[in-house]
């Protein structure tokens, strides 16, 4: 693997590898930003045809045109000289639902409901544009450190599924999608928008139950169960799940597409239970508000978001301990928005005031603590405090190396910023 492609993208670390694809963290020298580069190796087509490339580009453009906070931005796509197709997209920090479930076990109801609401909102937007995902599963949904949900790989499965007169990218007769999350009609080669909702139902079932709705020794038997068997009620695993939310999950697993709830209904019910029943639970309503402000921030409305965060901080400061996790999350959100508004000195001061409380409440190696330390160093560098920034970032790098794997995106980001800072300091000496 070359460490650079197209004279533009410097590959840094391998983030993941599957049967047909691998994903790298990279630096886009032209745009000056970190990106994710996904390579697809077409099965049996080392030299992908013009038709395959055109279809892949078409699907990438559809994804790029979605323009939704819940869908990573697509920057570039094409084919390399060796036949591999590539996709360059926003590098999303955080963990997939698969990793979160493996590390932390079944989700609390409110957290699962948050996933339902935000994922359904992204799907509703995509379906309104005529785009079907075709491969909703735990590993294709990410949670950012701020708690935002991102649906990955829109358009990939569609690109893998050709028209009758076009060549395939996958093995002969293979059906794009993943057996454990595939709706019955999709397994028969007839995916519709409601097929994505079936996949989301499988995701939510596993988030709540800790186990999949069906298990089998091979993909064929698994798809048979999805087509003809009824799964155990999710409440048999999670008796604490509210009846309305548990019923929503089970309706998503209906065999017939028309019997499944719409993405809008999933979003609305998910929002209710992410905020507590009828919004009556104070903690839940705070979570819901924080998520709304994060969506404003990600939609490039930092002024609106900052006002919301500042109001929440003021509202909670008198009634919560200074190291309450939700108060800390609100303060971090306000600092992020100050930085986005260009109020760098205020943002740096806000992060520095927040950091001791984050460290005490969350631990020195928590991702939120590392994030605040990175932002302080980044802002200090931008304010001309380069020597101080270098010291702060060097200490952060060493602490991250002791706590996270070498390919951790946060560590990679710190190392890259340090390298750029060193170049600046050398050039000014």
Image (tube, grey):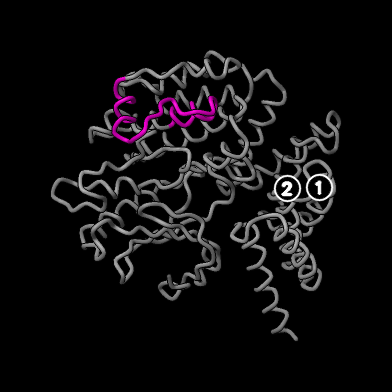
- SS class of the residue under badge 2? loop
Q: Residue 381: give x, y in percent of width and height.
A: 74, 68
Is 110 placed above or below 39 here?
A: above
The answer to whether residue 120 is left or right of residue 216 is right
Rendered residue at 78%/52% (across/down)? 351
| Residue at the far front in the pictured view | 217
Dominant secondary structure (helix, strand or loop) of the stretch shown in magenta: helix
Q: Nearer the viewer, residue 125 or 199?
A: 199
Q: Is residue 251 left or right of residue 26?
A: left
User: x%, y% of residue 317?
Assistant: 83, 34
Q: Which residues are magenta?
A: 200-228
Give the labeled residue for mark 2: 366
Q: Residue at x 40, y 25 (%)?
A: 262
Left-right relation of 241 to 307: left
Position of residue 227 measured from the top left corner of the image (x, y, whole percent): 29, 24
Residue placed furthest toward the bottom: 429
Side of 288 relative to 72 (left or right):
right
Q: Quadrant of the N terminus?
A: bottom left
Mark 2 in CB contact with mark 1 (< 8 angstroms): yes
Closest to the observer, 145 or 220:
220
Q: Is residue 116 above or below residue 21?
A: above
Q: Residue furthest left?
A: 165
Q: Circle 1 is placed at which residue position?
A: 359
Q: Is residue 329 above or below residue 367?
A: above
């Amino acid at each position: 693997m070359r460490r650079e492609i197209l004279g533009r993208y410097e590959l840094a670390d391998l983030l993941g590898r599957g049967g047909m694809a691998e994903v790298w963290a990279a630096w886009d020298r032209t745009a000056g930003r970190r990106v994710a580069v996904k390579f697809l190796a077409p099965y049996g087509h080392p030299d992908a045809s013009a038709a395959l490339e055109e279809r892949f580009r078409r699907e990438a453009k559809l994804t790029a045109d979605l323009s939704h906070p819940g869908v990573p931005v697509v920057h570039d796509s094409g084919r390399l000289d060796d036949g591999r197709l590539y996709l360059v997209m926003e590098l999303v920090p955080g963990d997939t639902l698969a990793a979160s479930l493996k590390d932390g076990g079944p989700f609390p109801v409110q957290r699962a409901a948050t996933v339902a609401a935000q994922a359904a909102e992204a799907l509703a937007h995509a379906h309104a544009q005529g785009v079907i995902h075709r491969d909703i599963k735990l590993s294709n949904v990410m949670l950012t450190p701020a708690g935002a949900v991102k649906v990955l790989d829109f358009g990939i499965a569609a690109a893998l599924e050709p028209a009758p007169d076009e060549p395939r990218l996958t093995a002969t007769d293979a059906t794009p999608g993943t057996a454990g999350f595939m709706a019955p009609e999709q397994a028969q080669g007839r995916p519709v928008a409601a097929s994505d909702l079936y996949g989301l139902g499988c995701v939510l079932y596993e988030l709540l139950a800790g186990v999949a709705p069906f298990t089998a020794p091979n993909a064929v038997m698994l798809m048979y169960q999805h087509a003809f068997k009824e799964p155990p009620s999710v409440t048999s695993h999670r008796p604490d799940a509210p009846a309305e939310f548990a019923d929503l999950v089970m309706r998503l697993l209906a065999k017939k597409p028309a019997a499944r709830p719409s993405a809008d209904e999933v979003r609305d019910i998910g929002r209710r239970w992410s905020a507590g029943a009828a919004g009556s639970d104070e903690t839940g309503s705070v979570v819901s508000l924080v998520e709304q402000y994060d969506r404003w921030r990600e939609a490039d409305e930092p002024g609106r978001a900052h006002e919301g965060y500042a109001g929440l901080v003021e509202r909670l400061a008198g009634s919560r301990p200074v190291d309450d996790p939700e108060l800390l999350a609100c303060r971090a959100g306000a600092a992020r928005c100050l930085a986005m508004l260009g109020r760098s000195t205020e943002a740096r001061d806000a992060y520095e005031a927040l950091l001791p409380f984050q460290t005490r409440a969350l631990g020195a190696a928590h991702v939120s603590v590392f994030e605040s330390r990175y932002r302080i160093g980044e802002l200090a560098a931008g304010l001309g405090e380069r020597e101080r920034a270098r010291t702060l970032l060097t200490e952060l790098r060493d602490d991250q190396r002791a706590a996270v794997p070498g390919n951790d995106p946060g560590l990679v980001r710190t190392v890259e910023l340090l390298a750029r800072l060193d170049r600046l300091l050398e050039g000014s000496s």
